[in-house]
Amino acid sequence: MQQSAVPELAHTQTRPIHWVATATAVAGVVALSSVVQPGSATAAQPAPGTKGTSAPAAVAPPSTAGVDFPLECGPVKAVVAKKATGDLDGDGRPETVAVVHCDAPMGTPPDGVYVLTRSAGGGKARVVATLIEPKERLTVTDFTIRARAVSATLLGYSSDSVPSCCPDTKTPATWQWNGSAFLRSTPAGAHSV
């Protein structure tokens, strides 16, 4: 074996103190980066002589927790089966749309579909519109909010003699806010049995 012409350097051998120093330095960088954040990015440059401002903080959508839904369930409780959020009326505050039914021990309980909002001050969520009443005996599937419209597929019954277990109609529906109420639309020829 040939000896190296360069003497061994003391700093080429790692010791526990080196690992402690490295870990401390990394922890310091991570802590500092969580405190120092860049400003909000904007797509457009402010006009000369004006000062740019960042967008307002996003408003949280209303929660379904603690809301009294207009649904009579007797001894069982109401269950939120599905929910979606979006700004349905264009006011910059999101609404929550909830599909709710009674927590029945058997069978397929009908769904009710409710729109929740809260005041501009951020108060308690409340029901402001009913899109589907449970008495309509419908089950909601394929439920979404897209482009300020609520869309769903509604499973129902062609007559009262059809058993509750087996809906025999399927209808797509869309609701959109017109400035004073939610209007329901169904594509022509969309009912199927």
Image (spheres, grey):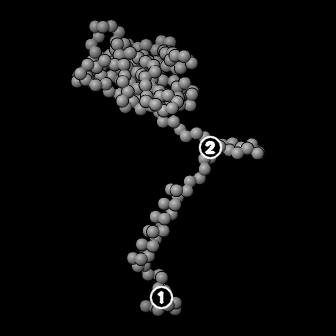
Give the residue drawn at x 46%, y 21%.
128
Q: Judge whether 185 appears above or below 145 on screen.
A: above
Q: Position of residue 55 (x, y in %)?
A: 60, 40
Left or right of 4: which side holds 75? left
* Type of amino acid under label 1: Glu
Mark sitting on residue 8 = 1
Q: Position of residue 161 (x, y in %)?
A: 28, 7
Q: Quadrant of the N terminus?
A: bottom left
Residue shown at 35% from the left, 9% from the top? 158
Within 10 Å of the Cα at label 1, are there few (<14), some (14-19), or many (20+) other Cα atoms? few
The kind of residue on which mark 2 rests is Ser
* Helix, strand or loop under label 2: loop
Local packing at callout 2 (Cα closer than 10 Å; few below 14, some 14-19, many 20+) is: few
Image spot of residue 157 (x, y percent): 34, 12
Q: Which residue is mark 2?
A: 54
Work out how far the residue at label 1 is from the one at label 2, CA to CA, in angstroms.
Answer: 57 Å
Tell me if I can see residue 189 in this picture: yes
Q: Which mark is residue 138?
A: none
- Residue appearing at x 52%, y 25% in the figure: 88
Q: Nearer the viewer, residue 150 or 58?
A: 58
- Dot placed on the residue nearer the N-terminal end, 1 or 2: 1
Determine the image quadrant of residue 191: top left
